[in-house]
Image: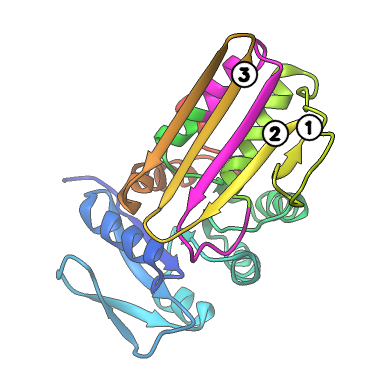
Amino acid sequence: MFGATMINVIVHGAAGKMGCEVLRALCSDAELEAAGAVDLKADSERLPLPDGCGEIPFSADLETILSQTNPDVMVDFTIREAAMPAIRTAARHGINLVIGSTGLSSEDIGEIDKLCRQSDIGAVVAPNFSLGAILMIHMAKLAASYFDYAEIIEKHHEAKADAPSGTALATAQAMVAARGRPFSYPALKKESLAGTRGGQVEGISVHSVRLPGFLAHQEVILGALGQTLTIKHDSISRETFMPGVVMAVKYVVKNKGLVYGLETLLGL
C-alpha cells in the first residue's frame, strides 16, 4: 500500500508453539513484517517463515537479532525466567513490547512499567490475548455484584508450566474488585482429600485441570438460591490469540507506557 509504514516485529520464543503462531499471524497482516526470531533452540542463522515467503535472521542471542533487524516491537510468549532478561534488553534498545509470557509477578509488572517510562516505549502485557476470554472476564465482573458465591475451573494442556493460569487469577481478582468485597466461601466440616476445594482468591475457589486434549478453557460459575450462572470460554486453537496480538502490536507503536490487559484496547 502506497505510503504505508510497515511495523517490523521480532519474536522471542519463536520456536515454541505460540511463537510459530505469532510468526504466521505476522505474515498474514499487510501492515506487519516478521523481521527476526530468537529462541534458545536456534540451530541455524536463518528461520523459514511459515507461509513460505522467505527467511528471517534467527539466533539464540537477542542482542544479535536486535543489531541485525532494528525492530519496532518485540513479541514474547515464553516464561518469566526467559522473558524478563529479554524485556530489559529490548527496553534498553528502545523496542516496544507485547508480552504474553506466563508466570510474571506483580513486581515484574512494576518493573516493566518503570522500564517503559525510562525508555519512553510502549508495552502491552496480558494474561490472555483471546478477545473472547477478555469478554468472559468483563461479563464475570458484571455478574459479580449479584452473586455471593463463585468458583472458577480452568483447563489447559498437560504441558502448561504454571497453575492456576494467569487468566484464572486475573478473572478472580477482577471479580472481587468489581464486587468490592470477598465472596462467601462455604465452610467445610471435613475435607477427606487435601486440596479438593482448590486454591482460593478472596472466597473464589480456583480449580486447575491439566490433561492432553485441552488447549485453554475456563468456566466461571456463580451461585445463588435456586440458580447458577456459568460463563464459559473455549480456545480450540492458538489462532484464537492472534487477533489480540496483532491489535497489541499496532497499539504499542503509537502509545507510550504500560497497558496491562487487552480490555483497555477493547474499550472495556
- The answer to if 156 sits in the magenta stretch is yes
Label 2 with label 3: CB-CB less than 8 Å? no
- Which of 7/209 is in front? 209
CA distance separating discs 2 and 1: 8 Å
Label number found at residue 247 = none
Residue drawn at (70%, 50%) of the image? 109
- What residue type is disc 3 on? Gly
Is residue 25 shown left or right of residue 266? left
- Residue 64, image x, y percentages: 48, 82
Residue at image coords 44%, 84%: 41
Query: Circle 3 sits on which residue?
Result: 223
What residue range appears in magenta? 137-163
Front disc: 2 or 3: 3
SS type, badge 2: helix
Numbered disc in front, either 3 or 1: 3
Q: Nearer the viewer, residue 52 or 135?
A: 135
Question: Which residue, given by chain and number where applicable, does mark 2 sit on?
Answer: 173
Amino acid, disc 1: Glu
Q: Give percent across and percent down for residue 196.
A: 69, 46
Question: Disc 1 marks which residue?
Answer: 202
Res 98 visible:
no
Q: Is residue 231 a member of the stretch shown in magenta?
A: no
Q: Which residue is at a point 34% across and 88% down the rendered structure image?
A: 45
Q: Nearer the viewer, mark 2 or mark 1?
A: 1
Is there any visible trace of residue 250 in the rendered image? Answer: yes
Residues at circles 2 and 1 in contact by the CB criterion of under 8 Å: yes
Q: Secondary structure at mark 1?
A: loop
Q: What residue appears at the point 78 percent right and 27 percent down from the top-left corner?
A: 186
Specify the color scheme.
rainbow
Q: Earlier in the sequence, mark 2 or mark 3?
A: 2
Q: Is residue 88 left or right of residue 186?
A: left
